[in-house]
Image (cartoon, grey):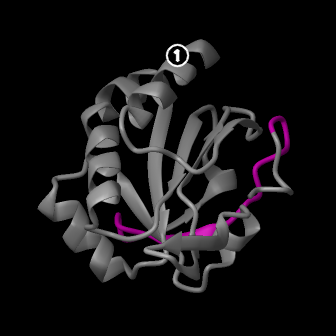
C-alpha cells in the first residue's frame, strides 16, 4: 500500500492536535524513538485492542527512550472519550483533514463484507531517534502487534 515511504527514509514532519491539549510536531521530538500507529476508528474492536496493548507496554516503551502516538481521522473530542474510557497512557493525534494519513500513504482501498471503500489501512511506523523510519508494519493484524513492535524497539536501542 505504502509506495512512497520506505525504511531509512526521513519521516515526514507534521503538526496535529493532540489529546494533551497542544499541537504535536514530529520534528520537535528529540532523542526519542517514536511508534506512530495509524488506526481506522476510535472505540472499534480492533482499534481498542491495539490501543490497550500499546497502553499496557507504555511504561516499558518510555523506559526505552520512546513514545507511542495513535493517529486516526477522529476528532479530538472522540479521542479524549476513547482515551478516558480505556485509560490510555499516551496521546492520540487527530487528523480530520487526512493530511498526515495521506502523507504517510495509509489512506487506501479497503473491503468489508464485499463492499469496497476508502479508509485508513492499519499501519505502524517505528521512527528512530534520528527521525528516520526504521520499520513499517502494513495491514497490521492486531493480535500481539504491540508486543512485536516493542521487541523491534528493543533491538533499536
Residue 14's place in the image compared with 96, above or below, is above
Q: Residue at x 26, y 71 (%)?
A: 80
| Residue 111 lies in quadrant | bottom right
Quick one: 109 or 151, which is closer to the camera? 109
Total marks in image: 1
The residue depicted at 46 percent of the width and 61 percent of the height is 39
In this image, 54 relative to 119: left or right? left
Residue sitting at the far front: 114
According to the picture, the residue beneath numbered tag 1 turns out to be 154
The span picked out in magenta is 7-21
**Spot occupied by residue 112 in the image (x, y as percentages of width and height):** 46, 72
Residue placed most toward the observer, 91 or 85: 85
Residue 98 image point, x, y percent: 61, 79
Name the magenta segment's main secondary structure.
loop
Q: Is residue 71 left or right of residue 46?
A: right
In the displayed structure image, the side of residue 56 where residue 127 appears, left or right: right
Residue 96 lies within the magenta run? no
Q: Considering the image in quadrants, where does the C terminus appear?
A: top right
Residue under the image location 13 percent in, 63 percent down: 85
Element carrying mark 1: helix
Q: Position of residue 50 (x, y in %)?
A: 35, 47
Amino acid at each position: 500500500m505504502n509506495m512512497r515511504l520506505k525504511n531509512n527514509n526521513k519521516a515526514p514532519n507534521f503538526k496535529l492536535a493532540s489529546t494533551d491539549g497542544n499541537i504535536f510536531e514530529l520534528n520537535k521530538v528529540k532523542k526519542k524513538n517514536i511508534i506512530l500507529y495509524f488506526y481506522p476508528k476510535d472505540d472499534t474492536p480492533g482499534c481498542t485492542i491495539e490501543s490497550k496493548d500499546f497502553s499496557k507496554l507504555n511504561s516499558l516503551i518510555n523506559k526505552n527512550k520512546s513514545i507511542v502516538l495513535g493517529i486516526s481521522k477522529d476528532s479530538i473530542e472522540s479521542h479524549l472519550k476513547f482515551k478516558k474510557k480505556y485509560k490510555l497512557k499516551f496521546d492520540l493525534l487527530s487528523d480530520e483533514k487526512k493530511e498526515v494519513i495521506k502523507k504517510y500513504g495509509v489512506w487506501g482501498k479497503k473491503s468489508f463484507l464485499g463492499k469496497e471503500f476508502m479508509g485508513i489501512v492499519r499501519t505502524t511506523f517505528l521512527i528512530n531517534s534520528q527521525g528516520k523510519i526504521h520499520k513499517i508494519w502494513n495491514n497490521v493484524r492486531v493480535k500481539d502487534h504491540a508486543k512485536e513492535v516493542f521487541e523491534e524497539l528493543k533491538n533499536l536501542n
